[in-house]
Image (cartoon, rainbow, N blue to C red):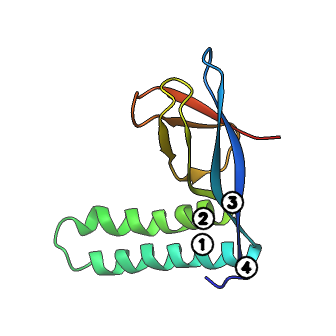
Amino acid sequence: MALNDVLEKKIPVRIASQNRGEREGQITVLFFDKATRTKRAMKRLAICWALALISIVFPLVHFILVPAFFVAGPVSAFLAYQTSSMVTGGHGACPYCSESFPIEKGALNWPLEDTCSKCRQTVLIHEAQ
């Protein structure tokens, strides 16, 4: 992906618990423009359909794999096209144990939910205002 197709932005966040207060953190988010989303969708479609073609040569399992990859292609392409932004990671301090933990990558849907890698408590991540 070219640099002008994707905007990478660091966003400050608040990591909150139900009764332990809040801590600060930061996430990195990729924002995709329409052309990049289309490229990502077409790439997923091509990969799934290529796997469907390759699956033809395998006896017996091709009855399941070919239709599965053929259907998974448009579904995967649609989901890739709908993704306009994505969290690629981040870090913050846990409100429960005060230890630093990595924020996992995933969809950007506020509030984010993650689990502390040290104490295994679930925390909510909000955009800092």
The numbered mark, 4 or 2, whose residue comes first in the sequence reads 4
The numbered mark, 3 or 2, whose residue comes first in the sequence reads 2
For the residues labelled 1 and 3, the Cα–Cα distance comes to 14 Å
Q: Tell me which amino acid carries mark 1.
A: Ala
Query: Is residue 42 visible in this depiction of the protein?
Result: yes
Circle 3/circle 2 CB separation < 8 Å: no
* Numbered badge on residue 17: none
Provide the residue designation for mark 3: 85
Q: Tell me which amino acid carries mark 4.
A: Ala
Provide the residue designation for mark 1: 41
Residue drawn at x 68%, y 82% is 3
Provide the residue designation for mark 4: 35
Nearer the camera: disc 3 or disc 2: 3
Q: Secondary structure at mark 4?
A: helix
The quarter of the image holding the C terminus is top right
Dot 4: within a 10 Å radius of its alpha carbon, few (fewer than 14), some, or many (20 or more) residues?
Answer: few
Question: In the rendered view, does 93 fall on the left or right side of 56?
Answer: right
Looking at the image, residue 27 lies above or below residue 115? below
